[in-house]
Image (cartoon, helix red, strand yellow):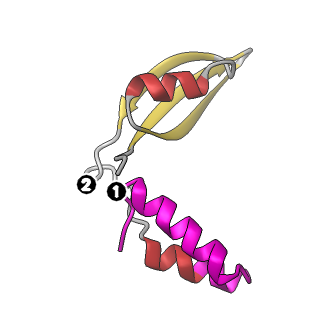
Amino acid sequence: MKKFNTYMVYLESHDEVTKVYIPAQSQKEAELFCQGNGEIIKISKMDKEKDRINTMNTHDIRKVLENACYGKVECDTIERLLSQCGIQD
């Protein structure tokens, strides 16, 4: 199972600075994901408890998908992929 962290990244492009949240296994992977979208000004790993992130779970996501008329196969696939990234009930 791959464990993902969430990184807060500030990107500067032209005269704008944008804050984005990137799920990635490492800071380097988050940096690679942001390549071509501007200069990285700051990147920091977020703390799950302190920053109150990653509070989603597969049960809640399945409910949302079912309410959006996704089928069982699609829901099972998405749930399994999320579980492999460390998001579970």
Q: Position of residue 7 (x, y in %)?
A: 42, 36
Label 1: how many Cα within 10 Å (few below 14, some 14–19, many 20+): few
In the displayed structure, 57 sits above or below 24; it is below
Q: Position of residue 61 (x, y in %)?
A: 53, 73
Give the magenta part as a residue range: 64-89
Which residue position is annotated with label 2? 49
Which residue position is annotated with label 1? 52
User: How far is disc 2 from disc 1 in space, using C-alphas?
Assistant: 5 Å
- Secondary structure under the numbered disc 1 in the rendered image: loop
Find out whether residue 83 is within the magenta segment: yes
Closer to the camera in the image, 51 or 35? 35
Q: Is residue 69 left or right of residue 64?
A: right
Instruction: Quarter of the image for the C terminus: give it.
Output: bottom left
Q: Is residue 67 left or right of residue 62?
A: right
Q: Do residues under tags 2 and 1 come within 8 Å of each other at their CB atoms? A: yes
- The type of residue carrying mark 1 is Arg
